[in-house]
Image (spheres, rainbow, N blue to C red):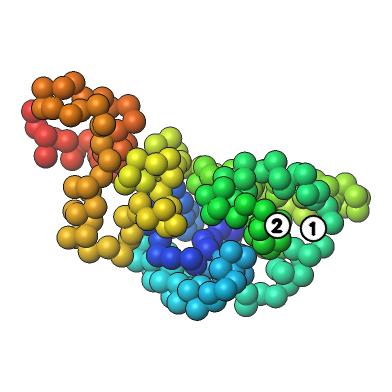
Amino acid sequence: MKKIILTGDRPTGKLHVGHYVGSLKRRVELQNSGEFDEIYIMIADAQALTDNFDNPEKVRQNIIEVALDYLSVGLDPAKSTLFIQSMVPQLTELSFYYMNLVTVARVQRNPTVKSEIQMRGFGGSIPVGFFCYPISQAADITAFKATLVPVGEDQLPMLEQTKEIVRSFNRIYNCEALVEPDIMLPDNDICRRLPGTDGKAKMSKSLGNCIYLSDDEKTVQQKIMNMYTDPTHIKVSDPGHLEGNTVFTYLDAFSKEEDFAKYLPE
């Protein structure tokens, strides 16, 4: 069996350092490893429309931004196939058939869907397309017969749902047509879900707490200087706390041993 990777991002904005440590860095490593027969990196514009249908221009413009971010981190079109989801209409068709294999109750139990719905404040006005986007992800993965999907921790429930769809389809139709993918999470636990600069659990474009890959040096420095740190450290004499301190979380995610020798020799 061929070793195939499928992964991607929704073009709802520029990519940030959370994307980098959570998945982009690993994608580049896997691309350059020479271990895989095919690598597909998808710009998921159709999925992005599920909660941006009233603003298609936002999605259209960000396709270019995401593509530039891909190239900037080292994804190489000579080694990986970069493509736009809506340019492959068969993926939408496959999503429609998969909807018959998943119950409403099962999608409602998906913790990522629940948190995304809450974060966006949909209330009872959830677009059906957004509600079903785990099914769309399953179609993307299985259409390319992906054997490995490198993702951030927040996407783990989505991949578990893909596995369920694969098992249901193969069982119902008594075949092995669909390939069950393996999941690859970041090897650094800190990188599995990088907090936002405001200390919230997740770095998110919609929360405005991101450091973008395209930010210039001055902007990055300004965002870091304004980062949430330790609310109990009010006076210089107060003891500091490492746990829950976003700055130290970032140090764990990005710093190497030689950095401390260079900048903090003491």
The percent coordinates of residue 9 (x first, y second) are 51, 61
The numbered mark at residue 99 is 1
Foreground residue, 203 or 137? 203
The residue at the point 82 percent across, 62 percent down is: 97
In the picture as drawn, the residue positioned furthest to the left comes out as 266
Quadrant in which residue 201 is drawn: top left
Q: What residue type is labelled 2?
A: Cys
Mark 2 → mark 1, Cα distance in angstroms? 8 Å
Q: How crowded is mark 2: few (under 14 residues within 10 Å), some or many (20 or more)?
A: many
The residue at the point 58 percent across, 64 percent down is: 51
The residue at the point 44 percent across, 57 percent down is: 206
> Of helix, strand and loop, which one carries label 1?
helix
Residue on which the image places disc 2 = 132
> Of helix, strand and loop, which one carries label 2?
loop
Q: In which quarter of the image is the C terminus?
A: top left
Q: How crowded is mark 1: few (under 14 residues within 10 Å), some or many (20 or more)?
A: some
In this rendering, is residue 72 above or below 147? below
